[in-house]
Amino acid sequence: MTSVKELSGRERAMLRAVAAGRGRLSGEPVLYVDGLRCCDQMAAHDLVDAGLLRPGHAVGLEECAAAVLTEAGRAAIA
């Protein structure tokens, strides 16, 4: 896990959407919110790399699973 920088408003919104059960994450990782591909995939990669977000179960590159927040992700939006 990399160190967590201050999150942007967009990153916090992405985490809140996942917390609300609206996110899916592929193994790439690509984040989908409400079935649509998130417009800021670099932010999605950063959130995964920072250990704030992960797929709910192991997936292949092209497969998707429900996105879930890690403990650190929940703390980041608390």
Image (cartoon, helix red, strand yellow):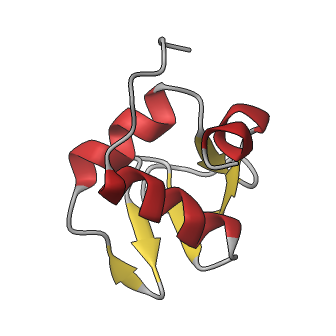
13 is higher (above) or lower (below) than 33: above
Can you see residue 64? no
Report which quarter residue 32 is drawn in. bottom left
Q: Residue at x 48, y 21 (%)?
A: 4
- Looking at the picture, tell me which residue is in the foreground, 43 or 78: 78
Q: Residue 55 in the image: x percent, y percent? A: 64, 52
Image quadrant holding the N terminus, namely top right
Report which quarter residue 13 is drawn in. bottom left
Q: Residue at x 75, y 51 (%)?
A: 57
- Looking at the picture, tell me which residue is in the foreground, 37 or 43: 43
10 is higher (above) or lower (below) than 17: above
52 is higher (above) or lower (below) than 27: above
6 is higher (above) or lower (below) than 54: above
- Quick check: 5 left or right of 34? left
- Looking at the picture, tell me which residue is in the foreground, 45 or 6: 6
Total marks shown come to: 0
- Quick check: 33 left or right of 22? left
